């Protein structure tokens, strides 16, 4: 079997395909990735087959999602995501994805929901293609409460499909989000609460973590000797939001500094002058630009997160409770799922200070039910099968 993954230049949307691709290779299949070559080279194992979706993506497009999106919420964030990122990305990569599919001739395309060009090529060519839904929020209608915005996005997606030869009568935007052949969802029913009807075969395979290359700032660069056995809390806003989270990270560092019975690792930048007590991190707080997160989570007791699906699932895969402060995109949905499952507490990103964060941490660390719920989700991930289950579903599809 020959498989081509089509992914956007977003870490959280690429990582699950790395694990599935590695599993497929161990089973004797051929695997390649199509997308932004610089992004893929940084996230795939050495020697992976990379097919550029475009020679060079526009600089403002690559930076849009990490810089210009900062501060946007709700409808404004959704409109920005489609108008300034997803649609331009689709138009910029359509020719390259088409050429990649023709040249590589895959038996099946695995297309991330935000790599719209891959879905269009799959539909236009009549090839077998599968949707990769990397977050449970991808399985619901993000515009359910915003009908005017949904109509606006639908019109643009119809126009995009018609412009590349798909008849208008067949250019249904829903068909770009969910392949009629199979939807691979990297989550579980236990985390979602209920499994939505997406009008297509849906396989909840759970998160896929394995087989990733070591990132910069890996295990060798982290000061493991600093850890002294006290309960450990990791604070991270992920790769997209870390640069704009100084206020929140400072509040988290202050909350941890006021609790000397804990140790805290804060990923990002803080503003010590904004602290209400002192103007430097306390001795029990480490502030670093990056961490070997997968390895560090094995030593943690709790996590403060923005609600990114990757970080949340990596946390729950270790049976750890969370304090979740969602910022935008799918994060409010993921945060609600964590809270409803009993595995964490949701707080308000823009308004929560050190006192509220400290109270939330005290609660999830002291009340056993939060860890028990996290461990229940951990078991659901193991039972779902992850990368192995995803590979099996792809094999069965053929």
Image (spheres, rainbow, N blue to C red):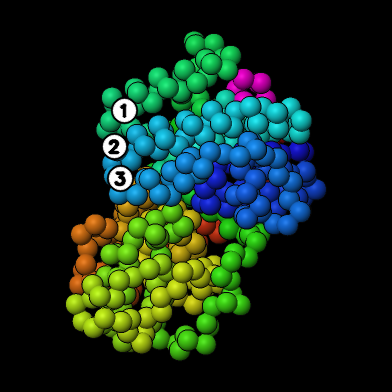
Q: Residue at x 60, y 28 (%)?
A: 94
In-image side of 152 versus 54 (left or right): left
Q: Pointer 3: residues within 10 angstroms few (<14), some, or many (20+)?
A: some
The x and y percentages for residue 336 are 31, 52
Alpha carbon separation for disc pair 2 and 1: 8 Å
390 versus 268 height, above or below: above
Residue designated by label 1: 149
The front one of 334 and 383 is 334
Q: How far across and down, in percent of the image, does residue 134 sit?
A: 51, 46
- Quadrant of the image for the N terminus? top right
Q: Residue 398 location, x and y as percent? A: 72, 33
Q: Circle 2 sits on which residue?
A: 75
User: Is 74 in the magenta?
Assistant: no
- Separation (CA) of disc 3 from disc 2: 9 Å
In magenta segment, residue 122: yes
Quadrant in the rendering for residue 221: bottom right
Stretch in magenta: 121-128
Q: Quadrant of residue 35?
A: top right
Mark 1 surroundings: few (<14), some (14-19) or many (≥20) residues within 10 A: some
Q: Which residue is mark 3?
A: 72
């Amino acid at each position: 079997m020959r498989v081509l993954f089509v992914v956007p230049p977003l870490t959280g949307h690429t990582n699950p395909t790395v694990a599935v691709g590695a599993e497929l290779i161990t089973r004797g299949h051929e695997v390649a990735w199509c997308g932004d070559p610089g992004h893929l080279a940084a996230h795939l194992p050495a020697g992976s087959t990379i097919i550029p979706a475009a020679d060079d993506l526009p600089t403002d497009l690559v930076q849009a999602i990490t810089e210009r999106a900062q501060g946007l919420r709700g409808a404004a964030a959704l409109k920005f995501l489609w108008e300034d990122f997803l649609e331009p990305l689709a138009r910029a990569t359509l020719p390259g994805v088409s050429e990649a599919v023709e040249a590589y001739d895959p038996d099946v395309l695995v297309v991330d929901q935000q790599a719209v060009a891959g879905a269009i090529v799959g539909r236009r060519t009549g090839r077998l293609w599968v949707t990769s839904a990397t977050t449970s929020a991808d399985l619901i209608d993000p515009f359910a409460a915003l009908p005017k915005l949904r109509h606006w996005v639908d019109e643009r997606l119809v126009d995009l499909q018609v412009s590349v030869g798909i008849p208008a009568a067949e250019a249904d935007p829903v068909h770009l989000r969910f392949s009629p052949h199979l939807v691979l969802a990297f989550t579980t029913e236990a985390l979602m609460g209920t499994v939505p009807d997406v009008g297509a075969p849906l396989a909840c395979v759970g998160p896929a973590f394995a087989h990733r290359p070591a990132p910069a700032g890996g295990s060798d660069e982290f000061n493991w000797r600093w850890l002294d056995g006290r309960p450990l809390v990791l604070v991270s806003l992920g790769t997209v939001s870390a640069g704009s989270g100084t206020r929140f990270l400072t509040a988290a560092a202050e909350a941890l500094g006021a609790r000397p019975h804990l140790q805290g690792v804060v990923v990002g930048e803080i503003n010590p002058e904004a602290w209400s007590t002192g103007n430097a991190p306390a001795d029990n707080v480490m502030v670093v630009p990056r961490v070997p997160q997968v390895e560090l989570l094995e030593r943690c007791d709790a996590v403060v997160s923005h609600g990114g699906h990757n970080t949340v699932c990596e946390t729950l895969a270790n049976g750890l409770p969370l304090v979740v402060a969602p910022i935008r995109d799918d994060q409010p949905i993921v945060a609600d799922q964590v809270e409803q499952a009993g595995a964490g507490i949701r707080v308000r990103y823009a308004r929560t200070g050190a006192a509220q964060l400290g109270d939330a941490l005290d609660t999830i660390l002291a009340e056993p039910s939060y860890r028990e719920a996290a461990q229940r989700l951990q078991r659901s991930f193991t039972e779902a099968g992850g990368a192995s289950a995803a590979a099996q579903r792809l094999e069965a599809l053929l």
